[in-house]
Image (cartoon, rainbow, N blue to C red):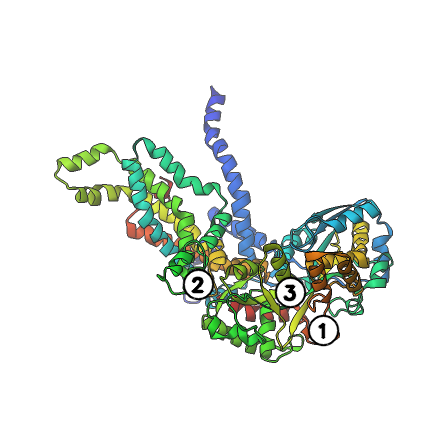
Amino acid sequence: MSAIPPRDPALLRGLTGRRMAPGRRDLFRMAGLSAAGLALAACGVQGKKAAPPQQSDVEKYWSDKKQNGHVDFANWPLYMDPKRPELKLFTEKTGISVTYKEVIQDNASWFAKIQPQLAAGQSIEYDLMVVTNGIQFTQLVQLGYLVPLDHSKLPNFAANAGEAYKREPFDPGNVYSIPWASGITGIAYNPKYVDEPPTSYAALWDPKYKGKVGMMSDAQEIGNFAMMLLGIEPEKSTPADWEKAAEKLREQRDAGIVRKYYDQNFIDPLGKGDIWICQAWSGDIFQKNVSDGTDLKFVIPEEGATIWTDNMMIPKTAANPVDAITLMDFFYDPEVAATLAEYINYIPPVPSAQEIIKRHAAEAKGEDKELLEEVATSPLVFPSEADYAKLHTYRPFKDAAEQKQYEQIFQSITTA
Amino acid sequence: MKSSRLRAALTPYALIFPGGLWLAIFFVVPMVVMLSLSLQTGNITDGYQLTWHWQTYLDGLTTYHDQIIRSLVYGLAATIVTIVIGFPMAYYIAFRGGRRKSMYLFLLLLPFLVSFVLRTISWQFFLADDGILLGPLKGAGLLPEDFHLLATSAAVIGGLAYNFLPFMVLPIYVALERIDPRVLEAATDLYAGRVQTFLRVVLPLSLPGVFAGVLMTFVPASSDYVNASILGGAGNTMIGNVIQNQYLVTQDYPVAAALSFTLMALLLVGIFAYARALGTEDVLEVAAR
């Protein structure tokens, strides 16, 4: 502006006019742009961090809730006998009918599915669901999506749950959840191809299994394995440890040892011989052997293994919370816990179930007897104190940023 | 009289209204939401805020350039395979199909009666290390014992080509079918041999079909994630898998949205460059044929 001598105001106006007074088109364009800007800004995703509940919140929530005679239960596949004997017994005893659906494939996609409805305060059409202790469980708690449990409605839990399950680090005091079952992540192998039983995580890095090793795509599971191989305790690990573990995993991948990073479908390739040795969950291997006649093996390496817990919880928009909590408590009847463990072969949170399974074994005959005896004495279903001492838990995260850092480090391995 | 003129004037709008509304609601609105998401920062617990964080695009490109390039390469390879296999198929059906034409077309579309994922999973069985295909070959000593097809690029590209083949064959078939037989007769009258006729008459006339086929194959194949996740292995991740992972596993919506837009931009640039190279003036017009 200063370059033009301001002699003639008309000339000045003429030179700058178009810019000073926008034409009709420009106005429209600007209006359009700002509307687009507003629209973009309106698309922010709301987060709702919730405060921990007080005793009065628990009472307030439960005070006006009544039994409705029905409960919708969302669970994982292979987590109950397909004939659903436990649910039939429950309906017989309480008159509450149950709709049981195996709709949860993994924690992350389940969370992604229910999160929009819960954020909007809408029903997810389930009153009871099972989620693993881990990232998504923490998020459900932090976002206030879970109903605080009324422990006066959980007498069986109080009487029969194992002590360890009453003081879990991820949900101290069982404010929001009580366990469904626990399991161990270890190494599974197909003895048809693997001659010597693996004893260490190093077997998964062994070049002689090149292209035949299956790893999990889950950031926690894969990170834990590398850390345990390096002698790091996962639950106490630091970001520097994660980097070291990632380096180890990168080596394994770049040497062509890893065939693929699986979500939860590692069992079929293991049975078929596409992979020979892999990361696996204890109960799945047992169920596969029973249902398909395979002879897969599961080991806990000498470095130890991780234990996880799948937990029952009530989403805050549940229509039938009283029926749901009644069902939750029902699974803590030792007889029920025993029959469930006999089928699914994961660790029941009710230690007294072991005696009942032994009794069932004594009463049974033939093949059933063998199977039941195996379950009752299996260290994978009833780990001893010494076994528990070798088991690690998942790394808890103090905030979202730390969790994101962890996930990014290990996802650069699995999505390469 | 007046009302009929009014009706005539309104008819085009009435016709376009359902489609326009559909696009506005299910295409434009989600696109705006996605664009907004890609410029937000935050996390799922504390919420996401629009901060015009363009850096996400740059970060996405630097972190995942391998997967982006791989996706384009796989998409291109699959497209070439579908042309090589699909063109002769379309040619045969159009010129030699005779009365069986509709049956051949039906056979071509038959796999589409089975779900996309199921078709791909059946390939997993077919290509298994000791499966129907490799088992006997290994047994006969034709292949080394540790040879495998699953979890390799070849399996992913093969799966993509298989799944998108009809999208290539149909447009080429339509283009070939439209060629006036008299044009071919004219070529013979002018002493063109079979090869000459094909190269100078049939092939140029079929190009719009090939172009439409490439569009309908390359774009979905490059952004596919089903084939890579079912048939691929540790080093075959495509950008679609990364986006899916960022949305559903990490819940990093901004990165996922930014990667989606980057991929879209790359594909659009690629298509326009291709249209230029082919000498077509209006991409949309050709694609619509």
Q: Amino acid at mark 2?
A: Pro
Which badge, 1 or 3, comes first in the chain's sequence? 3
B46 up-or-down from B158: above or below: below
- Within 10 Å of disc 1 (Cα), the crowding (few <14, some 14-19, many 20+) is some
Nearer the observer, B78 or A86: A86
Type of amino acid under label 3: Ser
Residue bearing the label numbered 2? A6
Please state the chain letter of the residue tagged with numbered disc 2 in the rendered image: A
Q: Secondary structure at mark 3?
A: helix
Measured as percent of width and height from the top left, residue A317 is found at 74, 51
Label 1 element class: helix
* Element type at mark 2: loop
- Residue A402 is left or right of residue A328, and the answer is left
Cα–Cα gap, marks 2 and 1: 87 Å
Which of discs 2 and 1 lies nearer the camera? The answer is 1
**Picture residue at 52% right of the left edge, 71% below the top:** A195
